[in-house]
Image (cartoon, rainbow, N blue to C red):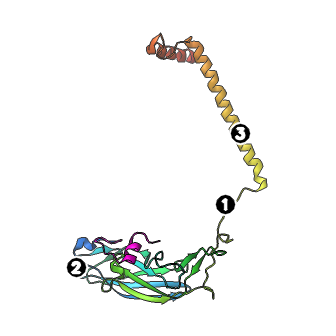
Amino acid sequence: ALIGYRWYHAKKRDVSFPFGFGLFAYGSAEVEYSDANATTSGGIVTITAQMQHSGPRAGHEVPQLYLSFPSSIPGDAESKPEWVLKGFAKKRIEPNSPVEASFDLSQRDLSYWDDAPGKSMWVCAKGTFRACVGSNARDAVLEGKGSCTTFEAPCATGNHVLVVKKDDSAVPRQRLPSMAAWPVFAAAAVASLLAVAGLGAALRRRQRQVGGAFGGVGVGGSAGGCDTLELLAQTENDNVE
C-alpha cells in the first residue's frame, strides 16, 4: 500500500524532513555513501556500503536500506510501492575513517504475498532487484546522495515460490491438552468453585453477626456515623476477648 514515504516516492513529492531524517553530529558534517555491493551465499543476499565523513567530530549515523522489487510482481502500479525499507542500523563514524554498513536479506525479504485464488503464499519475486543505502528515504535513492546496486533474486525453487502457506505444517499451532490431562483440569476447576463458595458463605455469616451487633443502626442512621464506628470497634474488641 502507498502510505507515508511510499506515497511520496510514487508521487515524486519532495518534503523538508523525509522518513528517517536526522542530523549527523548535530549538523556539523554530512555522511557520504559509496561502493554499494550485493553478494549472494546460501540463499542470503548481503548488501554492503561504505560510509565516511570529513567533519570535525565523530557522530552516529543510521544507514537505511531501501529495496525496489522487480516489475514482474503482479498488481497495478497505483498500489505497488517503488521503494520499501528493508533494514537499518546504528553506526559510529570517526572523521576520515570509513565504516561499512551491512544488511542481510532472506528469501522472505525478497518475497511478496500472493493472494490469488488457491495460493495465499509468499512468492519469491523473479527478476532484478535494486538496493540503495542512505541516510533517509529520499537521499538513499537520490543520485549523488545514496549508494545503489542491483542483484538477481536467489529463489529457492524453479517456479520461484517460497512455500509458506497458511496451512504449513512448519507453522506452530496452539494445541488442546491431551485426554489424559482433562481429569487434572477438571479437578482444579472443582477446587476453585468450592473455594469461591466457601468464601461466599463466610462473608454471609460475618454480615449476619455484624447486623445483630448493630441492632439495625447503620452508617448515616439515627445514631450517626460516629456511633456506628464505636459499635464496630466494640464488636472487634469483644471478638478479641
The residues bearing labels 2 and 3 have C-alpha atoms spaced at a distance of 71 Å
Disc 2 crowd rating (10 Å Cα; few below 14, some 14-19, many 20+) is some
Over which residues does the magenta segment extend? Answer: 1-19
User: Disc 3 or disc 1, which is closer to the eye?
Assistant: 1
Magenta-colored segment: predominant secondary structure = loop
> Which residue appears at 52% of the width and 12% of the height?
217
The type of residue carrying mark 3 is Ala
Secondary structure beneath label 3: helix
Say whether residue 230 is magenta: no
- Is there a contact, CB below 8 Å, between mark 2 and mark 1? no
Name the quadrant containing residue 84: bottom left
Secondary structure beneath label 1: loop
Tell me: 88 left or right of 163. left
> Which residue appears at 23% of the width and 76% of the height?
57
The residues bearing labels 2 and 1 have C-alpha atoms spaced at a distance of 55 Å
Name the quadrant containing residue 93: bottom left
* Residue bearing mark 2: 55
The type of residue carrying mark 2 is Gly
Percent of width and height locating residue 35: 36, 89
* Residue bearing mark 1: 174
Q: Earlier in the sequence, mark 3 or mark 1?
A: 1
Q: Which mark is residue 107?
A: none
